């Protein structure tokens, strides 16, 4: 399924139970999955470890804002970022993508959409897995 294995994936979510499930899924495809439970750990880990990919819960920050994503983009501009969310409103998806996410995946669809989103962002595209049909683009918005 995946074109090439990533060497390191940073997974950040405050909800331990869900994180373990996502970690298990990512470990089927990647040799190293590093976990972070808060915004500070995410930023520190991304800077220090230089992962290829970050999979991050939209509500990682206590204020549910997107400042963490903007900070991550500023400090690690080449890092691919997949945002996970329980919110399926288009305004939420658009805000995450505008803040710098490479992909947006609904938490209820992680099992079917997460690895496909990883494939798409590895190829330079972006993914909106929150829409019914899903959308992947080859780098530029259509």
Image: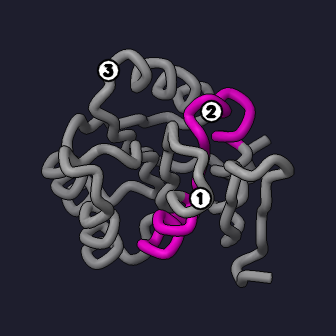
Give the image's coloring scheme: one colour
Residue at mark 1 to residue at mark 3: CA–CA distance: 22 Å
Q: Main secondary structure of the magenta part?
A: helix
Q: Which mark is residue 110?
A: 2
Rate crowding at label 2 as few (under 14), some (14 to 19) or many (20 or more) other CA atoms within 10 Å.
Answer: some
Which residue lies at the image location 55% right of the left edge and 50% below the top edge? 6
Which residue lies at the image location 28% right of the left edge and 58% below the top edge? 65
Q: Which mark is residue 16?
A: 3
Q: Position of residue 129 (x, y in %)?
A: 70, 50
Q: Which mark is residue 51?
A: none
* In the displayed structure image, the side of residue 11 where residue 113 appears, left or right: right
Q: Position of residue 26 (x, y in %)?
A: 55, 32
Q: Nearer the viewer, residue 11 or 141?
A: 141
Q: Is residue 101 magenta?
A: yes
- Looking at marks 1 and 3 on the same chain, the residue that comes earlier in the sequence is marked by 3
Residue 121, quarter of picture: bottom right
- Looking at marks 1 and 2 on the same chain, the residue that comes earlier in the sequence is marked by 1
- Residue 101 in view of the camera: yes
Residue at mark 1 to residue at mark 2: CA–CA distance: 12 Å
Which residue lies at the image location 47% right of the left edge and 67% below the top edge? 95
Q: Which mark is residue 103?
A: 1
Query: Range of the magenta residues?
Result: 93-115
* In the displayed structure image, the side of residue 44 where residue 140 appears, left or right: right
Residue farthest toward the top in the current orientation of the protein: 17
Q: Is residue 105 magenta?
A: yes
- Residue 8 in view of the camera: no
Residue at mark 3 to residue at mark 2: CA–CA distance: 15 Å
Q: Position of residue 69 (x, y in %)?
A: 33, 64
Rate crowding at label 3 as few (under 14), some (14 to 19) or many (20 or more) other CA atoms within 10 Å.
Answer: few
Is 71 above or below relative to 5? below
Q: Quadrant of the C terminus?
A: bottom right
């Amino acid at each position: 399924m995946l074109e090439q294995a990533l060497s390191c994936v940073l997974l950040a979510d405050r909800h331990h139970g869900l994180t373990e499930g996502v970690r298990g899924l990512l470990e089927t495809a990647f040799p190293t999955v590093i976990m972070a439970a808060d915004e500070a750990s995410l930023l520190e880990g991304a800077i220090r470890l230089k992962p290829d990919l970050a999979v991050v819960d939209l509500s990682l920050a206590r204020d549910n804002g997107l400042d963490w994503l903007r900070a991550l983009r500023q400090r690690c501009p080449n890092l691919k970022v997949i945002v996970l969310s329980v919110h399926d409103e288009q305004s939420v998806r658009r805000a995450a993508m505008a803040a710098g996410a490479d992909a947006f995946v609904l938490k209820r669809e992680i099992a079917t959409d997460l690895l496909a989103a990883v494939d798409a962002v590895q190829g330079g595209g972006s993914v909106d897995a929150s829409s019914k049909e899903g959308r992947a683009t080859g780098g530029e918005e259509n």
